[in-house]
Image (cartoon, rainbow, N blue to C red):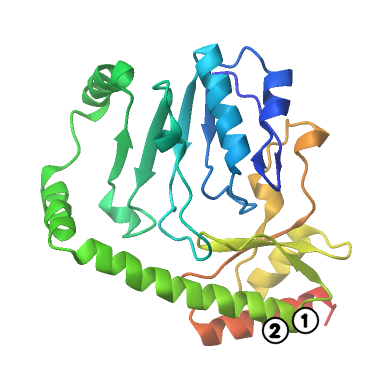
Amino acid sequence: ARVFPVPVDAQGLDVAYGVAHCPQAKLAYVTPSHQMPLGVSMSLPRRLALLAWAAHNKAWLVEDDYDSEYRYTGAPLASLQSLDRAGCVVYVGTLSKVLFPGLRLGYMVAPPALADALVQAKAVMDRHTAIVPQMALADFIAEGHFGRHIRRTRDSNAERRDLLVRGLARELDDQLLCGPADSGLELCAYFRAGHDEETVSRAGLARGIELRPLGHYADPAAGPECATPSGLLLGFAAIPPDEMAHGLQELGRILRGR
């Protein structure tokens, strides 16, 4: 595949840019519920524009809905797959985020035109996925445990997200600008002043906190249109409240040169 990067703004993927600069594209890979790492959700007009492009050009859309269960504000967003009238969306998801990565289970909702080919490709790649974990998961879902697990972890993650957002406003408002925090398990924070991402990240590791530079998620071959301000990706779902408070204090010391 020849990959063509498309910029993301406050409404998600810039569909018009992609159409203008890569009109020959045959597939678009998107994460409309929660763009990683910037955290924005694709607006409804952008979703409809992307679907219209795919239908007109007989192209495929791969909708990776990897953590849509963790949305904390507003009504649930309509997936591209639910809006698709041309049979062009391949909807994929994973249980790595909502359960645990070691389960090694994902799922796909494929258009009828692709279903047989995808089944054959799966058989060629690894024959089949382990049956026993699938059976255990099916019982886990059927007995209502999965739904309760999602509600419990969503509430827990929302509490920790709120702690992080309030902590950033209280401890680091002069240093960091918080990005969208409506969904997901992490949020991005942009530097208000000039800081080197890598230097801050290394200083954090030296003090026992993990900080992901936003630059790690950028395509070095992409043009300036795809550039984003420097900053950090801050995870919150796996961080106990006391550790989060400590991490914010240490980050404040780093950014203020203490």
Query: Quick one: SS at disc 2?
Result: helix
- What residue is shown at x 23% (from left), y 29% (from top)? 126
Q: Position of residue 63 (x, y in %)?
A: 46, 36
Residue 34 drawn above or below residue 129:
below
**Distance from the alpha carbon under mark 1 to that under mark 2:** 6 Å
Q: 10 Å neighbourhood of mark 1: few (<14), some, or many (≥20)?
A: few
The C terminus appears in which quarter of the rendering?
bottom right
State the residue lying farthest toward the right: 194
Asked whether the beta carbons under mark 1 and mark 2 sit within 8 Å of each other, the answer is yes
Q: Residue at x 36, y 53 (%)?
A: 96
Q: Is residue 239 visible?
A: no
Residue 36 higher or lower than 5, as above or below? below
Task: Point out residue 52 in the picture as x, y percentages from the top left corner.
Answer: 56, 23
**Residue 118 position in % (x across, y down):** 29, 22
Numbered tag placed on residue 253 in the rendering: 1
The one nearer the camera, 74 or 71, is 74
Residue linked to disc 2: 249
Tag of residue 103? none
Left or right position of 47 against 14: left
Instruction: Look at 34% across and 69% down and name the residue there.
Output: 151
